[in-house]
Amino acid sequence: MKPKHEARSTKHDNHNPVMLAEVIKNLQPKNGEIYLDGTFGAGGYSRAILESANCKVFAVDRDESVKKFAENLQKKFGERFVFLCGKFSESKKLLAEKNVAKLDGMVFDIGVSSMQLDDKERGFSFDSDAKLDMRMDRNSHPSAYEIVNEAGEEELARIIREFGEEPKARQIAKRIVAVRAAKPITSCRDLAEIVRSLYRGYSKTDAATRTFQALRIFVNRELDELKSALASSLTLLKQGGRLIVVSFHSLEDGIVKNFLKKEAGLTQTFSRYQPVIAKQNSPKNFHIITKSAISPSREETVQNPRARSSKMRVAVKI
Ligand SMILES: C[S@@+](CC[C@H](N)C(=O)[O-])C[C@H]1O[C@@H](n2cnc3c(N)ncnc32)[C@H](O)[C@@H]1O
């Protein structure tokens, strides 16, 4: 599985939450119901859910800087909207503190936001002179700077290969270790130049994209977070509750797809000519609505090219 790399790896611009219409259509918000928006960001999904029905939304984000958007929604929707600052892997605990144990729907829009990427000081972007950072939660550790300057060569190679699917991971790690022996690698641009120096010739995407993606995923433990969030849906969703996950690259989508397949009691047969079959005695916790992932419409990708690698999967709790 290859991630679809883009020069700027995010699926949003600030004003266009990806596949918003499809999210609302599949969530089917109803009066009196309770939803979790696990990745609040600028609040595009939360706002649309609250405008669709007289329901309640609990929104989680690990990035404190989104609080200003949460305050706007609180002003508009009052008690129907509650913002919880934290990781979505901790949603169960955060909701329990508000005496909520069960939900009618959970929505996740996985990955980095355009606001995070475009704010050069956050150190996500490879065309920035800012210090390497990449933490969605600026109180967490380690930062990308710490990893790039402190991790061993083997560890660096593993991170870049595993989370970036970078074919030159070993060479990049070696070059990083050689360069930092003289002086620390401080800025995003410095790191990008090191990676680019190992590539010659024209490529559609910047050679540094895969390494930056790998570091960001590692710094924020993004894949473990996703696995925990999916697991929590098993206990948090009511029967009939809906799970919607919008992901950006194939590493994430693969996790969502495999989780749903397992929890729907489906397993792939070894023959490509046989359909997916239900395994006897395997769990049946979800009914999958999206047999194949939904992609954004052509209109959306024309309007918001960053959305084009997104995939949405939907399932209903049984
Ligand atoms: C792609 S943006 C979401 C955009 C949002 N749907 C909107 O309409 O504005 C992803 C957001 O999720 C947050 N996030 C990513 N991983 C998280 C995690 N494990 N726990 C909590 N928030 C997370 C990021 O900080 C970011 O603000």
Image (tube, rainbow, N blue to C red):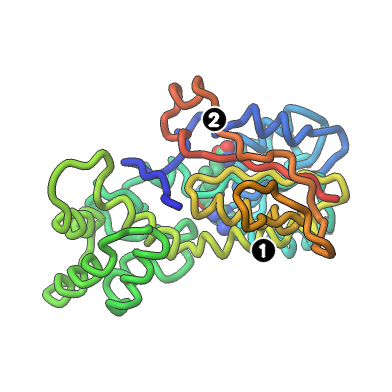
Residue at 62% across / 42% down in the picture? 70
Indicate the quadrant where residue 145 lies: bottom left
Counting other residues with Cα less than 10 Å from the Cα at mark 1, is it few (<14), some (14-19), or many (20 or more)?
some
User: Residue 68: in sight, yes or no?
Assistant: no
Counting other residues with Cα less than 10 Å from the Cα at mark 2, is it few (<14), some (14-19), or many (20 or more)?
many
Mark 1 and mark 2: span between their CA atoms? 29 Å
Residue type, label 1:
Glu
Q: Which residue is under mark 1?
A: 90
- Find residue 219 and name its label: none
Q: Nearer the viewer, residue 130 or 49?
A: 49
User: Residue 28: in sight, yes or no?
Assistant: yes
Q: Is residue 215 left or right of residue 42?
A: left
Q: Is mark 1 within 8 Å of ligand 1?
A: yes
**In the image, residue 155 lies at what x, y percent?**
35, 76
Residue at 63% across / 39% down in the picture? 292
Q: Nearer the viewer, residue 287 or 9?
A: 287
**In the image, residue 119 lies at what x, y percent?**
36, 45
Q: Is residue 89 left or right of residue 12?
A: right
Q: Nearer the viewer, residue 203 or 14?
A: 203
As helix, strand or loop, the secondary structure at mark 1 comes to helix
Residue at 85% across / 40% down in the picture? 33
- Find residue 296 and name its label: 2
Q: Is mark 2 within 8 Å of ligand 1?
A: no
**In the image, residue 104 lies at what x, y percent?**
82, 45
**In the image, residue 190 lies at what x, y percent?**
19, 58
In the displayed structure, 67 sits above or below 173; it is above
In the displayed structure, 84 sits above or below 7; it is below
Q: How many labels were placed on the picture?
A: 2
Mark nearer the viewer, 1 or 2: 2
Q: Earlier in the sequence, mark 1 or mark 2?
A: 1
Residue type, label 2:
Pro
